[in-house]
Image (cartoon, coloured by chain):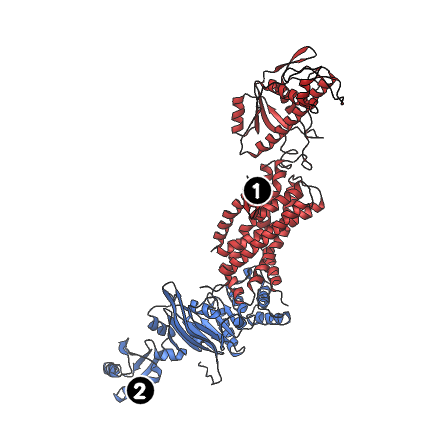
Chain colours: A blue, B red
C-alpha cells in the first residue's frame, strides 16, 4: 500500500552526484537519491550494478570519488554514525558471545549508557523473538535465528536510518514473514527509515514504499512499486472467456486494433490481452466487446510483476 | 566515562577463553614446543642431571720427554697425564664427570665427529711433552725470577746462568726465596694441542670450552708444582701425586645443561609463536565483517587496538608462568628465587606484548587468515634466530652518532632473552644490566606498537578507496 506523506516529510538521506570509479571502471555514476523519513526504500539492481558500493559510500565505509551524502541535512561523517544502523548481508557477529553479550557489546561501542542499554537489549531480544536464546552463544544458533540477531545488532543504538542488505537471505517462509512484520513495525512504530537491498522481488514489492533500480552504476528509475508496475515492463495479462466462443476471431481483431492493447492472441479457447495497467483499461475493453455484439463470461488478470519491471529495465534476470 | 577499550579487552578475553580449542592450542603448542626442545637438548627430565659428561675422543701421539731432576732422568709423558686428567675431571663439589673418553683411532674419531657421536676430538702431537716441559719450565722460571729478571740472573756472581742452561740461581735480593734456587730449563720447542669438532654443533662449543678450561688448570697446577720443586730443591716429578683440579664453573651455572642455557631463548620463541595465532585471529575479525561493524560504531581506532592489545596481553600473562613452570618440570635449573620468577614473568609478558604488536602489524597487511599464518611463520623463525633464541650470533656492530650498537639490538626479543638469561639462569636479580635490557625491551615494544597501530589504522580502519 502506498503511504501518503505530507509536506512536512523531510529527506532522511540524500546523495548528491555520488560517483565511484575504481581504476578505469565507473562503478557508481552520479547517483542522486532522496530517501524520505520513515519510509522503506527498496534499492534494487542486478549483481555488479553498484548497489553495495553505493550503500558503502552512504554508510561511510567507502570514500566516494566525487559527490556527497547528507543525513537530514548533515554531511556524512563520524557525527552521523549514531544515526545509521547497518545489517550486512553476511552474518557479522562474535560467535563465542551470547546473543545478549553481542548486543551489549555493540551498544557499548556506540557509547550507550548502561542504564539505557540493558532495556534496549531486552527490547530487541523481545522484538526479534530472541529472549529465550539470549544466553546462547551465536555459534549455537540456527541460521534463521542468527539472521535475526544480525539485524538486531544494527538496531541496538536506536539509529534513525537502517540499512538492511538481503535481510531475509536463507530464511524459511515463516521466518521471512516474521521479519517482514518486524521491518514494518520499525517503520510504523519506531519511525525508522529503512534502506532495503534485496534480490527477492516479492519482498521489495511487499515492504517498499518506494523503489530505486540501478544498473551499471546508474539510477534507472525510482517510484512506488505500483507506479513502476503500471508504467514499466510488459504489462498485465488479461484472459477473457467469451459467452460465445465463435466470436473469438472477431473480438481478437477488435482488440488488436485498440491502441491500449500491446498484444492479443488466442490461448486454449480464451482471448489473452497484454497491456500496462490493464485493470484501469478493463471497462474500455469490455465496452468494446459488448458494442461488437459479444459478451464476457469470465475475466482473469495476472498483474505485471516487479520482476517483469526489473527485467525490462536491466535486460537480465536478477540472479545472473 | 565509557571506557570502550576495557569493553573490547573484556570481549576479547571472553572470546579467547571460551574458544577452548583455540585457547588450548595457544597454551599447549608452546608447551609442546618447549618439551620437544628439552628432549633434544638434554633437560633433566630426559637425562640424568645434565648434558654432562661430554663424549669425546683423545688420540695421543705424544712420545714423551726425558726430565732430569736430582741427577735422575725419567721419561715423562704429559699426553698420557692430560688424558688421565680429562678422564678424572669432575665438576666442583660434584661427582659429575666432565668427559667420557672414547679409546679410538684418529680415523674412527673423525667418523664419530661427522656422525656427532662425539662432541670433540683431542689430538695430542708427538712432541707435546717436550713442548709442555719447556712451557712449564719457562713459566716456573719466570715465576721465580719475576722480581729480578733474567738480566740479573745473568749478572749474578754466583749463578752464571743462561736461559736454556740454568742450573742454580743465587737469590741476590734476599726475598722469600732460598738463597740458592734450581732454575728449570726452558727451550724453544712448541707444539699444538688440537681440539677438533663440528663448529656448527652446539655441543662442540660447550665441550671445547670445558677442555680449554681443564687444560689451563692442568697447566697452572703443573707449573705450580714445578715452581715448588725448584724452590724446595726437591725431586722434580711433575706427574707424581698429581691430583686433577676440579672445574669451577662461573657463579650460578653449576650443573647447567645445554637446555638450561637455551631455556630463556625457548621461552621467547614460544611467546613469538603466538604471533601466528594472534594475527590470524585479528584477520578473522576482518573476514567475518565484525571489524566493519566496529568501524561503523563510534569506537576510535586507538580504543579498538589498545583494547585488543590488552586482551591478548592477558593471555600472555597466563602463558608465561605456565611456560616457566613447564620448563622447570622438564628439568630447567632456574635460579631458585621468587623475585627472579616474578621478574622473569614481567620480562616474558613485555616480550609477549611485543609479539602482539608484531601480530597487529602482520594483520595490517594479510588478506586472509591463511596469509596471516603464512606471514607469521615466515617472520617468526628469522626473528627467533636473529634475537639469539637458539644460539648466540656473531656480533654485527654498527656505529651511529658515535655510539655502537649490535644490529640485533633493534629486536625487542633480543633484550628479553638477555634479561631472562640473567634473571633466570644466572639469578642476578634486578641488576643494572637487567634494568638496561628491560628498558630497551619496553622502548622497542612501544615503538613496535605505535608502528603497528599506525599501519593497522591506515590499512584496516580508514575508508576504503
Point out the image quarter for the C terminus of chain B: bottom left
Residue B203 image-quadrant placement: top right
Q: Is residue B381 above or below residue B89?
A: below
x, y (%) of residue B463? 48, 65
Point out the image quarter for the N terminus of chain B: bottom right
Q: Residues within 10 Å of mark 2 (few under 14, many from 20)?
A: few
Q: Of helix, strand and loop, which one carries label 1?
A: loop
Distance in Å between CA atoms under marks 2 and 1: 94 Å
**Relative depth, front residue between A92 and A82:** A82
Which residue occupies 57% across, 28% down?
A: B120
Q: Residue furthest bottom?
A: A291
Query: Which residue is label 1 attached to?
Result: B388
x, y (%) of residue A47? 39, 66
x, y (%) of residue B100? 62, 26
Query: Which residue is label 2 attached to?
Result: A284
Q: Is residue A9 above or below residue B63?
A: below
Q: Chain of mark 1?
A: B
Tag shown at residue B280: none
- Discs 2 and 1 share one subunit: no
Amino acid at each position: 500500500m502506498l503511504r501518503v506523506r505530507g509536506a512536512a516529510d523531510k529527506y532522511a538521506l540524500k546523495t548528491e552526484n555520488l560517483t565511484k570509479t575504481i581504476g578505469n571502471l565507473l562503478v557508481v555514476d552520479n547517483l542522486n537519491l532522496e530517501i524520505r523519513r520513515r519510509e522503506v526504500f527498496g534499492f534494487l539492481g542486478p549483481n555488479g550494478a553498484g548497489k553495495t558500493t553505493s550503500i558503502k559510500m552512504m554508510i561511510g565505509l567507502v570514500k566516494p570519488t566525487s559527490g556527497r551524502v547528507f543525513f537530514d541535512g548533515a554531511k556524512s561523517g563520524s557525527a552521523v554514525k549514531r544515526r545509521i544502523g547497518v545489517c550486512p548481508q553476511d552474518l557479522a557477529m562474535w560467535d563465542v558471545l551470547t546473543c545478549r553479550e553481542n548486543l551489549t557489546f555493540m551498544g557499548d561501542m556506540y557509547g550507550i549508557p548502561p542504564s539505557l542499554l540493558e532495556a534496549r537489549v531486552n527490547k530487541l531480544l523481545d522484538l526479534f523473538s530472541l529472549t529465550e536464546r539470549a544466553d546462547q552463544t551465536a555459534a549455537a544458533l540456527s541460521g534463521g535465528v542468527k539472521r535475526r540477531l544480525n539485524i538486531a545488532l544494527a538496531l541496538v543504538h536506536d539509529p534513525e536510518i537502517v540499512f538492511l542488505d538481503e535481510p531475509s537471505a536463507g530464511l524459511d517462509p515463516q521466518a521471512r514473514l516474521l521479519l517482514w512484520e518486524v521491518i514494518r513495525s520499525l517503520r510504523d512504530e519506531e519511525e525508522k527509515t529503512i534502506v532495503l537491498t534485496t534480490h527477492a522481488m516479492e519482498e521489495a514489492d511487499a515492504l517498499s514504499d518506494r523503489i530505486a533500480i540501478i544498473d551499471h552504476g546508474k539510477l534507472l528509475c525510482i517510484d512506488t512499486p505500483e507506479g513502476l508496475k503500471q508504467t514499466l515492463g510488459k504489462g498485465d495479462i488479461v484472459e477473457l472467456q467469451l459467452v460465445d466462443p465463435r466470436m473469438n476471431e472477431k473480438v481478437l481483431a477488435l482488440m488488436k486494433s485498440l491502441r491500449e492493447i500491446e498484444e492479443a492472441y488466442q490461448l486454449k479457447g480464451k482471448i489473452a490481452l497484454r497491456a500496462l495497467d490493464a485493470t484501469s483499461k478493463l471497462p474500455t475493453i469490455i465496452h468494446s466487446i459488448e458494442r461488437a455484439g459479444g459478451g464476457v463470461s469470465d475475466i482473469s488478470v495476472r498483474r505485471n510483476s516487479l520482476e517483469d519491471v526489473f527485467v525490462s529495465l536491466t535486460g537480465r534476470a536478477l540472479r545472473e | 566515562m565509557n571506557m570502550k577499550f576495557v569493553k573490547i579487552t573484556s570481549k576479547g578475553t571472553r572470546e579467547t577463553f571460551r574458544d577452548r580449542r583455540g585457547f588450548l592450542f595457544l597454551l599447549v603448542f608452546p608447551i609442546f614446543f618447549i618439551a620437544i626442545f628439552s628432549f633434544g637438548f638434554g633437560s633433566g627430565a630426559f637425562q640424568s642431571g645434565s648434558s654432562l659428561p661430554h663424549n669425546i675422543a683423545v688420540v695421543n701421539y705424544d712420545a714423551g720427554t726425558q726430565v732430569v731432576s736430582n741427577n735422575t732422568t725419567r721419561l715423562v709423558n704429559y699426553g698420557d697425564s692430560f688424558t688421565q686428567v680429562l678422564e678424572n675431571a669432575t665438576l666442583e663439589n660434584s661427582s659429575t664427570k666432565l668427559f667420557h673418553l672414547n679409546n679410538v683411532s684418529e680415523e674412527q674419531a673423525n667418523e664419530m665427529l661427522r656422525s656427532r657421536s662425539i662432541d670433540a676430538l683431542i689430538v695430542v702431537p708427538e712432541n707435546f711433552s717436550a713442548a709442555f716441559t719447556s712451557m712449564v719450565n719457562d713459566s716456573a722460571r719466570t715465576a721465580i725470577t719475576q722480581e729480578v729478571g733474567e738480566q740479573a740472573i745473568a749478572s749474578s756472581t754466583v749463578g752464571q746462568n743462561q736461559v736454556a742452561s740454568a742450573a742454580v740461581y743465587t737469590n741476590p735480593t734476599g726475598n722469600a726465596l732460598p738463597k740458592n734456587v734450581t732454575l728449570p730449563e726452558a727451550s724453544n720447542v712448541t707444539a699444538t694441542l688440537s681440539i677438533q669438532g663440528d663448529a656448527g654443533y652446539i655441543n662442540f662449543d660447550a665441550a671445547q670450552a670445558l677442555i680449554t678450561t681443564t687444560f689451563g688448570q692442568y697447566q697452572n697446577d703443573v707449573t705450580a708444582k714445578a715452581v715448588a720443586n725448584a724452590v724446595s730443591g726437591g725431586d722434580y716429578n711433575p706427574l707424581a701425586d698429581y691430583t686433577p683440579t676440579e672445574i669451577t664453573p662461573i657463579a650460578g651455572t653449576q650443573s647447567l645443561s645445554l637446555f638450561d642455557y637455551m631455556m630463556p631463548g625457548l621461552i621467547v620463541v614460544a611467546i613469538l609463536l603466538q604471533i601466528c595465532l594472534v594475527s590470524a585471529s585479528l584477520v578473522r575479525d576482518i573476514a567475518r565483517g565484525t571489524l566493519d561493524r566496529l568501524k561503523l560504531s563510534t569506537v576510535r581506532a586507538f580504543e579498538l587496538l589498545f583494547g585488543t592489545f590488552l586482551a591478548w596481553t592477558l593471555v600472555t600473562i597466563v602463558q608465561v608462568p605456565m611456560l616457566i613452570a613447564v620448563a622447570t618440570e622438564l628439568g630447567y635449573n632456574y635460579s631458585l628465587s621468587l623475585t627472579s620468577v616474578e621478574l622473569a614473568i614481567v620480562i616474558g609478558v613485555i616480550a609477549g606484548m611485543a609479539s602482539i604488536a608484531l601480530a597487529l602489524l602482520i594483520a595490517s597487511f594479510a588478506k586472509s587468515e591463511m596469509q596471516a599464518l603464512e606471514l607469521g611463520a615466515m617472520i617468526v623463525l628469522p626473528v627467533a634466530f636473529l634475537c639469539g633464541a637458539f644460539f648466540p650470533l656473531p656480533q654485527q656492530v654498527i656505529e651511529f652518532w658515535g655510539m655502537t650498537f649490535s644490529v640485533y639490538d633493534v629486536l625487542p626479543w633480543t633484550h628479553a632473552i638477555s634479561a631472562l638469561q640473567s634473571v633466570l639462569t644466572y639469578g642476578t636479580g634486578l641488576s643494572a644490566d637487567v634494568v638496561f635490557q628491560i628498558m630497551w625491551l619496553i622502548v622497542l615494544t612501544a615503538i613496535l606498537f605505535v608502528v603497528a597501530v599506525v599501519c593497522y589504522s591506515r590499512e584496516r580502519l580508514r575508508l576504503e578507496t
